[in-house]
Amino acid sequence: MASELELDLVEISPNANPPVCKILEYKKFLYEQKKRDKALKSKATKVTIKEIRFGPQTDEHDYDFKKKHAEKFLKDGAKLKAFVFFKGRSIVFKEQGQILLLRLAQDLEELGKVEQLPKLEGKRMIMFISPKKK
């Protein structure tokens, strides 16, 4: 039948019982499939992660400045990776770093929720905050 119509016999779903086949133009079928895949891919949400770096003895003004940036990132729908970087012997101030990150989480409570509590990884204490759904 396909050769009579000068078209191709295309197997749509080979796993079905019996296998499903259609008589159509194969190039057109491939083009539409590619188009469909591209449309699905464009609808998928892309997660961006923004980083904010603190020191263990970050001053009040610097903290407020970085907090404003964090608020902007969360309003834009990006995830936030806040971390305290310990240089040299400043690793002895682990508690200060943890207090700083928890304070940031508390200040950003209405904009985002804490995805991962502060955790020490090497010389960094990292915390993730994801934006709340609107």
Image: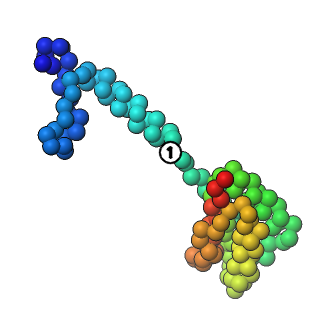
Q: Position of residue 55 (x, y in %)?
A: 74, 72
Q: Position of residue 14 (x, y in %)?
A: 18, 40
Residue 115: image quadrant is bottom right
Q: Nearer the viewer, residue 12 or 99?
A: 12
Residue 97 visible here: no
With 2 as the anchor, is 132 left or right in this view? Answer: right
Residue 109: image quadrant is bottom right
Quarter of the figure with the N terminus? top left
Residue drawn at (80%, 59%) of the image: 68
Residue drawn at (40%, 37%) of the image: 37
Q: Position of residue 57 (x, y in %)?
A: 79, 76
Q: Nearer the viewer, residue 54 or 87?
A: 54
> Which SS class for mark 1?
loop
Q: Looking at the image, is 56 positioned above or below residue 132? A: below
Q: Looking at the image, is 87 positioned above or below residue 30? A: below
Categorize mark 1 by other alpha carbons within 10 Å: few (<14), some (14-19), many (20+): few
With 33 as the anchor, is 58 left or right in this view? Answer: right
As shown in the figure, which amino acid type bears the numbered disc 1? Ala
Total marks placed: 1
Residue drawn at (65%, 59%) of the image: 132
In the image as oriented, which residue stretches furthest toward the bottom? 92
Q: Looking at the image, is 60 positioned above or below residue 48? A: below
Which residue in the structure is indicated by mark 1?
44
